[in-house]
Amino acid sequence: MNRSNEGTPDRSIVSGSDFLHMAIDEAPSGGKSEWLAQQIRLALADRRLPVGSRLPATRVLAGELGVSRGVVTEAYQRLVEDGYVAGRGRNGTIVVSAPATTTAAKPPTPASPSSRRSVFTTEPGADVFDAIRTTRARIDFSPGLPDLAAFPRAAWLRAERLVLDRLATSDLGYGDPRGTPALRMAIANWIARNRGIRAVPDEILIVAGTAQTLTLVGQVLRGDGISTVAIEDPGSLGARQHLHNCQLDTPPVAVDSEGIRVDELRATGAAAVFLTPAHQFPTGVVLRGSRRSELTHWASKSGGLIIEDDYDAEHRYDRPPVPALRSMLADSVFYAGSVSKLLAPALRIGWILAPPKYRDGLVDAKRFADLGNATLPQLVLAHFMESGALERQLRHLRRQHRRRRDTMVKAVAAHLPGAIVHGAAAGLHLTITFEAGFADTDVAAAALARDVKVHPLSWHCQLPRKPGLVLGYAATPTTDISEGVATLGEVLRRMS
Amino acid sequence: MNRSNEGTPDRSIVSGSDFLHMAIDEAPSGGKSEWLAQQIRLALADRRLPVGSRLPATRVLAGELGVSRGVVTEAYQRLVEDGYVAGRGRNGTIVVSAPATTTAAKPPTPASPSSRRSVFTTEPGADVFDAIRTTRARIDFSPGLPDLAAFPRAAWLRAERLVLDRLATSDLGYGDPRGTPALRMAIANWIARNRGIRAVPDEILIVAGTAQTLTLVGQVLRGDGISTVAIEDPGSLGARQHLHNCQLDTPPVAVDSEGIRVDELRATGAAAVFLTPAHQFPTGVVLRGSRRSELTHWASKSGGLIIEDDYDAEHRYDRPPVPALRSMLADSVFYAGSVSKLLAPALRIGWILAPPKYRDGLVDAKRFADLGNATLPQLVLAHFMESGALERQLRHLRRQHRRRRDTMVKAVAAHLPGAIVHGAAAGLHLTITFEAGFADTDVAAAALARDVKVHPLSWHCQLPRKPGLVLGYAATPTTDISEGVATLGEVLRRMS
């Protein structure tokens, strides 16, 4: 062994011979330098060569490996350029930094591996929906999902093939931040047919779902000096969190059997309001005509702005949906739609129609957010909408969801005789309230212990309310619905 | 004709008989009320029934249409609930609002239909890249695109079929805001193989491209009280705009032949710096080992943070790429990668590895931004990476791009004898500088008038520099490259 380059104790010597146990035979001919550099990088990464150690002299290592000295010199030069080693004159070549060490790759873990209990016993934070999503339960009544098993996979793949066949090369580059013209046109037609809204494609901005709508609209409103967006109470916790995150206050405004109390809205002095008029979340109330008139008056007199989340308007069972507020109040309404309840939330596609005054600002916000949605899924969806496939899917879902709703309504009547059912005429969920001396979070926790997942109504309330549960039925088979509601009945009887 | 409900002049009477020229035969049996309500909504929308007009009395219209009075009463009730009409006692039923009118749907227009000249004669604004993208030119040297004609459409569709076959139903719901486990694992393996970075999937956050990375990191840094991110000069105008949009100052730091001047960086007092170490944009300089050491020193002594945009690091022609800074400085580096230069910008998929301290905050920012990327394209990409298809694509691109680079270097030597070529050893573009008494924006404008699109170097400079052009070659066929550079030569000769 050649130990002629004896160093100080904190600079342990690494010398040739079996240096790193390298097998030079493995090096590709013509690529020996890079191979050698890479072997040393690996040794740096796993700390076989710690920072402060000295590499063998080039002459020595070349001799030991049976390569020309130039091969070693070039490998060292690459490591110098990497910044891993530095020449220190007569002190030789020293390791000065190393790749980050980590343990070997292991499978990813859930974002919020909460315990089953803690999700309901702590104040819901920004990650509450991750926490409840990753909490396992045999029967899942989380609201907000359509029947995902009905996702038309074969039709989606067929549409994707057509899109890939017809795609222009330039469609693969950076695109219009507002979305592809084809999808904006398809959505203009969809909302005209289904939601009574007349709009030209240039008024439509494609976004990554309603969560992004709230963040972009929140930014634009803040930029316009607005600091308060009133929200319905009960009202979506998720929407409230998103608006809060934009530094917006969200004073609660009560919802009664006719919808939001516009007199109370006026009293808050808020410049804007977040609404779910077609099927209020979570109560299911449809905003009545008289309230619509009051809102119109509020918007025109005070310049009030409305964020209309039309999240499940297409899902009505008894009669066609009421038209969107946007159809009457184009100058005051930010209209938010998405395919999360029509196809799948995993697609992350939604759309905004903004009041003309805010349109350009919203396009700028979308550009800064992500330069625009991905192109291929937009084109597939456009094909889906224009070919009638989405309408077929909606008809199929309506039948399926209606069966499941009927099952749940019957099961609630049978197993939860004291409960009042709200908002079952439409949508993907219903809400029950009950008289009780305990918190609905405790009911939810007890249900989860029995393998049934529900949202406590109180999550979606800022004002004191009767306890209740929000029960999604659309994504759950009927046998599970009956069984799950029976379990809820047992849970409530035991707690009473 | 029944004109018994004579009104005031501003409330024109609409009476029965041929009211709206409705053909009741078209109404579905059992759906007459909704059909009638819909006919009236359409008439409201196109102003055949203006606000203030009065609907025919129910008895009258029922008689004229030959339907029961209940059908008309129910249709009117729906319109009341819509908020379009209101009962006014003896004054009848009055139109009080109407759906928004728009002109008939027309094809969408470009986001920024700038004139050819204005794109180079005005200060570049937030929409400058939209403006130049939508400006037509026969030969396009805009930098930042790989050869999009090489996008592996058939392989992408095959991977999509596999993904759709194997997908769990729950994968179609809301997902982990950090991205799918499969893609985070595939990226951990990709960056270990190609960029010398060891990371576990939990350290990786999937985002919608590097534009989103900049916005999310900017938000997190602002939230941590940081107000300044130094940037290279020359350096990416787009990155600078994104950081500005997060209310961050971006003092310029000069780049010389060894990379960023770390002494100047230190002098700015900035807490963070945005860097393109592997192939500096736009000069193409590779950050040298000595500068890497200085940066390491700066980061460890002053707690400085680095945003490392590794945008085209995989595209080297002469030797393997240098390792990422992240591989040495995991605690200080936000590492940004994407597939925009490997596959296509239209996919909008990228990834961030953050310093541990900022990881949770970045996940929160991504959740509020859009709840996480769409699932299907992530799974297709994961399959692409793990199957070796992406490495095959990269090898194909390297050969293709190298040919195009060689053509451009030769053409510049032939047609632009006074120009100096920078950064041709890697990447998707090169930069030329020249001695001239005129602005490079004027050269770009003159080239555009001759149907050749280029970026003026001055767009990417905050400090005074020699005029130059940034010339993307990767997406342009060789014959167009030769012709386009010849045109640039003529343009420069005429201006000199």
Image: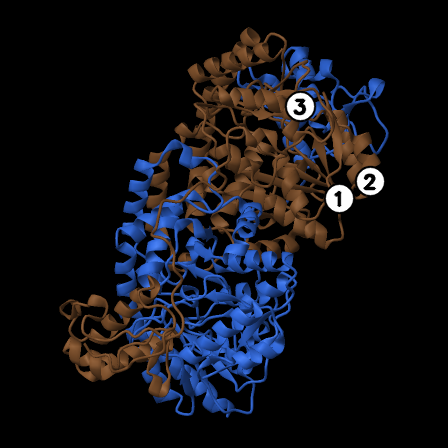
Chain colours: A brown, B blue
Q: Earlier in the sequence, mark 2 or mark 1?
A: 1
Residue A122 x %, y %: 61, 33
Q: Are marks 3 and 1 on the same chain?
A: yes
What kind of element bears circle 2?
loop
Residue B208 x %, y %: 48, 53
Q: Is residue B250 left or right of residue B169?
A: right
Q: Amino acid at mark 1?
A: Thr
Q: Is residue A98 left or right of residue A132?
A: left
Find disc 1 in the rendering and name its residue. Answer: A228
Give the residue displayed 50% in from the left and 39% down from the top. A112
Subunit under mark 1: A
**Looking at the image, residue B61 lies above or below residue A103:** above
Q: Which label is found at residue A285?
A: 3
Q: From this viewpoint, is residue B232 visible?
A: yes
Give the residue displayed 30% in from the left and 65% down from the top. A48
Find disc 2 in the rendering and name its residue. Answer: A269
Residue A420 x %, y %: 64, 13
- Label 3 to label 1, Cα distance in Å? 24 Å
The quarter of the picture where the N terminus of chain A appears is bottom left
Q: Is residue B219 left or right of residue B391?
A: right
Q: Are marks 2 and 3 on the same chain?
A: yes
Mark nearest the camera among 3 and 1 is 1
Subunit under mark 2: A
Give the residue displayed 40% in from the left and 71% down from the top. A97
Subunit under mark 3: A
Q: Residues within 10 Å of mark 3 (few under 14, many from 20)?
A: many
Identify the image quadrant of residue B314: bottom left
- Label 2 to label 1, Cα distance in Å? 9 Å
Of residues A137 and B52, the one drawn nearer to the viewer in this rendering: A137
Q: Is residue A189 left or right of residue A18?
A: right
